[in-house]
Amino acid sequence: MRTLLPLLCLISIASAAEKQPVDELAKLDARALHNRGTQRLAEGDLAGAEEALRASLGRDIDPLRPPALHNLGHVRFGKGKSALGERSAGDVTELSIARSYLEAADADISDMKDQIELLDKAKAEGREPDYVPATAALGGGINTFRTIKKLIPKEEAMVAKRNGVITLWTRSVGDFRGAHELDAADGPALANAEAIEELLRALRRETRALEEAIEAQRKKLEELRAVIQELIKRIPDDKLPPNAEGEGDEDEENFLPPERRKPRAGGGEPKAPKPGEEQKMTEQEARGSLEGLKNEFGRKMPAGGAGDKNGKGGKPGDKKGKDY
């Protein structure tokens, strides 16, 4: 048995060695890595190209550093362009949509405020208000509110994507400028750096504008909510638009105060117990019963009968107690 132990240990060590991943790039020298990275770039494999070119730079072979940096500049610019859908600029449509909904919100707020004024005027004059335009204005305001609320997370994702591109292109500029500093004859590297810097300035402007639009939308939601709630106060339940309580989506805001909300499906009267099944009290019923018991046991017993003017206790048969 003792002779088998060393053999088992060797087998275990060999198995562990086989499971370890083999780093192919570690076997290559700087030139082979540079060539592989350049080939991957030509094939459109940007991730593979970046990995090989960075490994080549890590070998610290001076003659290969300028071309490796030049190609890395192309890689990182290409990755940013790919993130933008193969465009070299952000999509201004995103910003246009954000701004258009801000304008729509302003229009809805104005319409709803006008209806509030008309309803208040009719009430002051003792006339029956015309709820039709008020209901339409309220429904439009609620739709705009919910659309903007759903739009903001998508816009924030766009901002995050743009910021990622800005980071990549900033590094790309650094790569191209580094290549030119090491090799002054590499004029294209300098030209690329300057061209990408111009694209960066435009992308940063658009991204800041989109961030400002998102912040404006958040503030506009608060303004919309306040006006919606004010208009709802003036419209009876049977005149409210269907979207006032949402359309079944749990994320949709219910603008009605709690006392005016309709019970949700399955949230009505408790079901009758089945035969032989114990009926349980609801939490509200339990609290009510508990308060009743507190009041009952906290009450003082009378010292004497109500009809005894001398303060003496009445006959035992005259006292009325609580039947338990």
Image: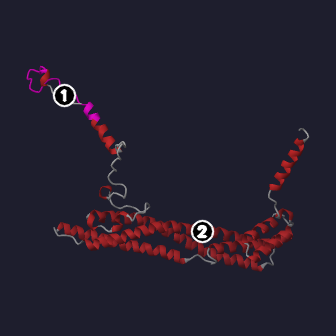
Tell me if residue 296 is in the magenta stretch: yes
| Residue 208 visible to an observer of this rendering | yes
Residue drawn at the location 28% of the way across and 62% of the way down: 233
Badge 2: how crowded within 10 Å, few (<14), some, or many (20+)? some
Labels 2 and 1 touching (C-beta < 8 A): no
Badge 1: how crowded within 10 Å, few (<14), some, or many (20+)? few
Highlighted magenta segment, given as a residue range = 293-315
Badge number at residue 321 = 1
**C-alpha span from label 2 to label 1:** 78 Å
The one of 131 and 14 positioned closer to us in this rendering:
14
The one of 105 and 47 positioned closer to us in this rendering:
47
Badge number at residue 269 = none
Residue drawn at the location 73% of the way across and 75% of the way down: 44
Circle 1: residue type:
Gly
Circle 2: residue type:
Lys
Badge number at residue 161 = 2
Tell me: 111 left or right of 168. Answer: left
| Residue 234 visible to an observer of this rendering | no
Q: Percent position (x, y) of residue 227?
A: 34, 65
Secondary structure mainly formed by the magenta segment = loop
Q: Percent position (x, y) of residue 307?
A: 8, 26
Tell me: 287 left or right of 14. Answer: left
Q: Percent position (x, y) of residue 273?
A: 34, 47
Chosen colour scheme? secondary structure
Compared with residue 187, is residue 51 higher up or lower down, i.e. above or below? Answer: above
Which callout, 2 or 1, points to the residue nearer the camera?
A: 1
Residue drawn at the location 27% of the way across and 37% of the way down: 292
Which element is circle 2 on? helix
Which residue of the protein is positioned furthest toward the right in this rendering?
3
Tell me: 149 left or right of 271. Answer: right
Q: Quadrant of the C terminus?
A: top left
